[in-house]
């Protein structure tokens, strides 16, 4: 298998994408390639017609150029058209269904599938023919979510985007890449911008997170979105499971010789593409990074997160159970100690008893990691003393442990019975009368 | 946009693919990763269950490894299972349809789409999670076509493959690459093997087709099938429209200085992946190569094929209209001239009047190029005097002309009315009484 | 010619270099690979002996590791050893010379060349065998210049470095690369650090210089110093010859559509490697960038610098001819105008009459560009109103014009007769009585 | 360290090289860039003059183009000019030597070095400024060796080439690359052509040597000769030290699972560039390949050659000691056995006692490997029964063992005392009366 030959191939995608963007950005006269004043609607209909078969690439290009020049109001209007004018044909479905239920032949199944599929989906597939089409479609959905997200009628269009993107951005097509100080600036800049958990304060801060040998960062990319990370995770290599994000990220910390690390800490994971909402990457990313790091550093034995608890303070407040905390309390040893004794049992209860719809934990971060098969490993008092950490969780952070041997069992216990798998260290905070959840791992 | 960063990314796909192949090929003991003796069926069900959510990549890998070890009979058995056991649920469709026809809400549409989609499709998507999954799925379909193609019940499985591949191998995800003497040997070897029109007789013959500056070759690739061309086209740069393939490929010919070429001749186009049957690449390939060559060589004015006429002799024979031709007739000037006068009008009739189902021309190559919007430009007597050329077409070859200005109109005339667009040079062979088809271009 | 195959090859150099650095940085126990306590001297002698022939790579590695661990005082001591202990053998030269002057045979010439060459040169060549050797040698010379530069006895060692580097860094081995926003951060960081003319104030400032489509940056690299630019030039694309660096670099300026540019302005050129002092890159860099830009943007007609005049104020002060300038004078229109009338004729005199040793202009920037064959095109009053610009040149900047048609003639006039080629616009400031230098271009 | 950024850089070298070649090959009108009819001599003098400083790249290009168009006789005439007209100036050397012997100051040493260096060397350095210059200079020396090699006066020119190439092709600048079935065809084609030991019979034979997982091939490349291997070595991975080349290369052999290999066999090593004669690569290549393979396959314990004995038959014949061998004797078991008993002691004597000038073994292959520090390990009767093997060595082959622990000691014993280090298995063939050479390893 030859990678370099293939590397060259990618140039073409990149260049075609760039060509499109430059053309539409800087040479407006080029964009009017139409023979007649065409609208988004007429172009859409043409693309789905016989003209689309003969000149799909050119028509798709034209429609995307046109879309790029429209103000947001017209774009939303276009989505309304897609929602209403490109729905499946009710009568055709009825006929196909009648035929299929009488004879479940392959032919009839195909007819039924075709009748049910909204023509929007084929329109999107044909738009993808154009150079840069994938990026343009992802941006289109971002427009839709951002500016039309509250409009129930547009939900159908969003569903079709989501369906296609789920197929196109299948994990099998994604590429894992390390992000480090040799990564192109334009990609690093996006890492700074997209970091959603612990804000990156400019280039020096970024460098501290990606350059030292005990820090790693990995991202998923898609071949058709060449310089756009889809999701990335930041990792610290340590000697033990850390309890404080400020400690972990301290400017003055000592770099750990990489051979001494036993623990990989996932301390931030951020999605980058609003237009890919609902396409799940995080689960795959964490597990592949565990694999990569295990291969590179066989001495690593522990894979763990250092995670925020975004819903804790609000949950306490709602229950009226919150502690009385003076501003600056966490800097006062005695006050901190008092609040610790009071709050850790409440935290254990929050994770183990506070349920949202579907019987799953209220905390979204907990849902994500437990759903991946991780175990709630430890509660960290004063884990995050930033304003946000104090505001959302009274400074609480937690660790979720990824132990590949138990991932599957944990996941199934969680998925089927809602079991929140925890360590004894967490369960100790529960009152003795409450039956401890069975530990799977 | 940074291409080199991305180039490196591709390494990972290539290596993961290779890792899988090597593992399964050389270390059988590694392949039994299961906790229990699992079957293709149990693995398939697990992959679609909660276990598949937690451990999708590993399960998919396991299933593909298992499949790779099965003999062909078990593989076909597996396809039967997929056809029967992974069909959509009739009752569920009925319920979803009832709900939808009463209220075409987004929610109801989603439910209907989900009910109708055969679970096979999701199974295939999850198999694609594994490293090398895409290649394995394409190979799987090749098994199906080759060994189960005649079994009507398996048609459904093939339809689902075709649907997914149509989406995954969308032209927007393909990469056009020149094939030349600096291409890796393993890819060139595939070009030799896959050439389907004018056989390549080993490496020296290949070199004559890709190395001289007046010869070009281009292929489409997909990022997940890194060293597998999907389709390729061979091109000769000439001073005029050629009429003979033996002349075009003569070993002793003189190389044309590239600056003197006015005409690009597409003389061979071959699909490489039986597992991608029905996914259409050829149309896009020709048009993009026209674009590429126009950009590189602005003096090119004519883009034309030199094409076989595979159905001509059989059609004549069926009609009893074939000429009486002695062996070796084409080497005898007088005999050749006689047959020419007799056969060219028959050839014109073949193209313009011999229709298959749907009113389209009987000749498959004609259907392809006319469907792309090309025009039938010229009939070439003694165009291919190889045994195959004589046997299938009494030596006839034709040129189809790709003129981008008329592609769309030609295509529509052909698609909507079945019009075979031809040049006057071809129409002259028709009897005067027969109304000449209207020329679009 | 296949570039991708070759691209992969480079990985090996990069990785070998990295391997060395990591090893010596993080695993001190690995660095003591010797069988006995060896000194820099014993290792040097071993490397030049038979052991060096058998184990050159390992010995070179060991010596470089050892050197890297020594404090600077021991390094200088090592250079003293090289200067004294690795000089050519006087008696051997005498014998070889006697033989050669009697018979200038090839054999005798070889013997003479070998006798004369200081053994240091062969030592350096053998040190280069080690992975990362080239970078280590360049760093070694940087130590020598920085810490031993004032010691006359070490001059010989520096001369040998300079001789070898002149051959190894021959322009034919250099690679020109654009530097832009897709360049790896580690290289951009060096651009920030090495910029020597108009300081780059962090990443935002850098981005303004490399990302907009009317800004370019190019650097020379050497295959064995993979992530170290050797020299770079910053270019602005404009509609006319600019007169003010503050105007050119203004944050709020409008970006020029690249198709409207007629002029490429070289406004900063910086050497990056102190260890390569005296190896001349600038001349080649400017000329190749002119070629590159001409090819990419055929509408460019003018290639010009915007250059500082670092010696002007000092020269005036020395002559007692400086103007009386109040602080802030350049912000006062009347004062500025007065100083303009006074200073421009002095500036013209500075360029045309102030000569240093060898009859060349006193101004080092002038010597560089005139020596390259450029012409002094324009004096720009208030061209640089930064503190440095006011301090060194009372705000004066100039443009040198690179017109490839006249480069050679200008260079020869300058080199042979010391002629400072100027435009009429500059000559007008000279008093009429002084004969204007003949204009070559 | 960022490799991909650097990879892109290399493109420029490749493209510049290609640009030059294409230009000179296909557009003769472009090649006459001179202002006047210039000769190789006038261009050479210009390049060394002030014009060369201003327009070195262009002049070098012009001279190389001009050279490329000259017939071989004019090229040799040019070399004669270089030999006679570009020698150092005797009087200048005399003056510099007088100054230096009175005062060995750095300045005087520099002056002496400059006086002694033939101006040819600087001319070659300046020719290297042109795109493709390095390749052109290597080709130039190939012309010189091939067509002027017997002319004593040209020896000086060859010496200067050799000196420069020795510095430019320093091992620190070389790149080791695996050669396999994913290598570009144009490079594989060169491997076929350059193989000098056991001829490669076309592409299928080549594939058998580079594709199976128990076969490897490695080559050195130089960044400025991008698609030209300099030297390559073919390796077989085996379970034991092989004794027969026909056995090793048998078409029908079974491929060894790579995990079972214990032994790496270097069975062919070929130089590719006649123009680089005398620049030593083989020693470095073998040792680096040992390192690479050790890293990849830690189970390998033995690194050994399977080598021809090219001078054996001639030596025997000269001594009149050769055996009486009938044609086809090696196929006759009894005859073979007789000759074995007779010839192995003679072979041992050949290696241990037959000395050439300088007291080194007569056999050139032995000199190479013993000089590298290898040990003569085993004599293989009927090791090569090809016509060449029978003709040159009566079928004898030998193994040289590379044991990195003893390389240095072996080399020194060989270099200083001429000791041929052998195994006991070889020494047993010596008559007891003869003192066995001391074994170093």
Image (cartoon, coloured by chain):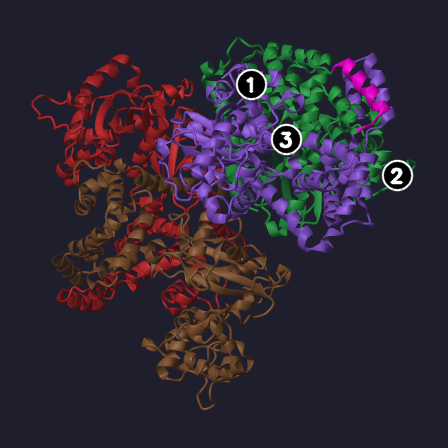
Chain colours: A purple, B green, C brown, D red
Please state the chain letter of the residue tagged with numbered disc 1 in the rendered image: B
| Outermost residue toward the top in this view | B37
Image disc number at residue B436? 2
Instruction: Point out residue A130 in the picture as x, y percentages from the top left corner.
Output: 69, 41
Q: Secondary structure beneath disc 2?
A: loop
Q: Quadrant of the N terminus of chain D?
A: top left
Is C370 on the left-hand or right-hand side of B201? left
Marks 2, 1: nearer the viewer:
1
Q: Residue at x 23, y 57 (%)?
A: C157
Marks 2, 3: nearer the viewer:
3
Q: Nearer the viewer, residue D68 or B74?
A: B74
Look at the image and tell me whether residue A162 can be seen.
yes
Q: Which residue is mark 3?
A: A318
Look at the image and tell me whether residue B200 can be seen.
no
- Cα distance in 3D space between marks 2 and 3: 84 Å
Image disc number at residue A81? none
- Cα distance in 3D space between marks 2 and 1: 62 Å
Q: Are the two marked residues, 2 and 1, in contact with CB atoms closer than 8 angstroms? A: no
Q: Which residue is mark 1?
A: B59
Instruction: Point out residue B423 in the picture as x, y percentages from the top left corner.
Output: 81, 42
Q: Are marks 2 and 1 on the same chain?
A: yes
Residue A340 is inside the magenta segment: no
Residue B93 is inside the magenta segment: yes
User: How dense is the environment of label 2, judged by Cα within 10 Å: few (below 14), some, or many (20 and up)?
Assistant: some
């Amino acid at each position: 298998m030859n990678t370099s030959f293939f590397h060259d191939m990618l140039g073409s995608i990149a260049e075609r994408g760039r060509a499109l963007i430059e053309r539409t950005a800087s040479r407006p006269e080029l964009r009017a390639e139409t023979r007649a004043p065409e609208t988004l609607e007429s172009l859409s209909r043409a693309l789905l017609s016989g003209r689309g078969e003969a000149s799909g690439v050119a028509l798709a290009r034209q429609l995307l150029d046109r879309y790029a020049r429209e103000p947001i109001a017209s774009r939303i209007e276009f989505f309304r058209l897609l929602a209403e004018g490109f729905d499946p044909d009710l009568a055709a479905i009825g006929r196909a269904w009648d035929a299929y239920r009488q004879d479940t032949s392959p032919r009839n199944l195909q007819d039924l599938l075709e009748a049910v599929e909204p023509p929007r989906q084929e329109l999107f597939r044909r738009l993808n023919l154009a150079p840069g089409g994938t990026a343009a479609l992802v941006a289109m959905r971002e427009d839709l979510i951002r500016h039309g997200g509250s409009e129930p009628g547009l939900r159908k269009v969003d569903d079709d985007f989501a369906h296609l993107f789920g197929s196109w951005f299948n994990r099998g097509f994604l590429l894992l890449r390390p992000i480090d100080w040799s990564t192109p600036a334009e990609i690093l800049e996006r890492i700074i911008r997209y970091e959603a958990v612990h804000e990156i304060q400019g280039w020096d801060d970024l460098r501290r997170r990606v350059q030292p040998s005990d820090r790693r960062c990995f991202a998923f990319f898609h071949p058709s979105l060449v310089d756009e990370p889809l999701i990335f995770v930041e990792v610290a290599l340590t000697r033990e499971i850390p309890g404080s994000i400020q400690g972990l990220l301290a400017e003055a910390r000592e770099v750990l010789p990489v051979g001494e690390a036993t623990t990989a800490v996932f301390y931030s994971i951020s999605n980058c593409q609003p237009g890919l909402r609902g396409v799940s990457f995080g689960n795959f990313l964490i597990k592949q990074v565990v694999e990569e790091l295990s291969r590179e550093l066989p001495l690593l034995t522990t894979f763990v997160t250092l995670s925020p608890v975004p819903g804790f303070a609000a949950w306490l407040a709602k229950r009226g159970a919150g502690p009385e905390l003076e501003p600056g309390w966490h800097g006062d040893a005695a006050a901190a100690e008092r609040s610790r004794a009071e709050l850790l049992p409440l935290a254990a209860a929050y994770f183990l008893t506070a349920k949202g719809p579907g019987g799953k934990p209220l905390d979204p971060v907990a849902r994500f990691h437990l759903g991946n098969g991780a175990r709630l490993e430890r509660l960290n008092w004063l884990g995050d003393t930033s304003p946000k950490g104090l505001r959302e969780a009274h400074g609480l952070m937690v660790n979720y442990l990824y132990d590949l041997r138990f991932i599957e069992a944990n996941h199934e216990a969680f998925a089927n019975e809602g079991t929140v798998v925890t360590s004894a260290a967490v369960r100790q905070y529960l009152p003795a009368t409450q039956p401890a959840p069975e530990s799977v791992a």
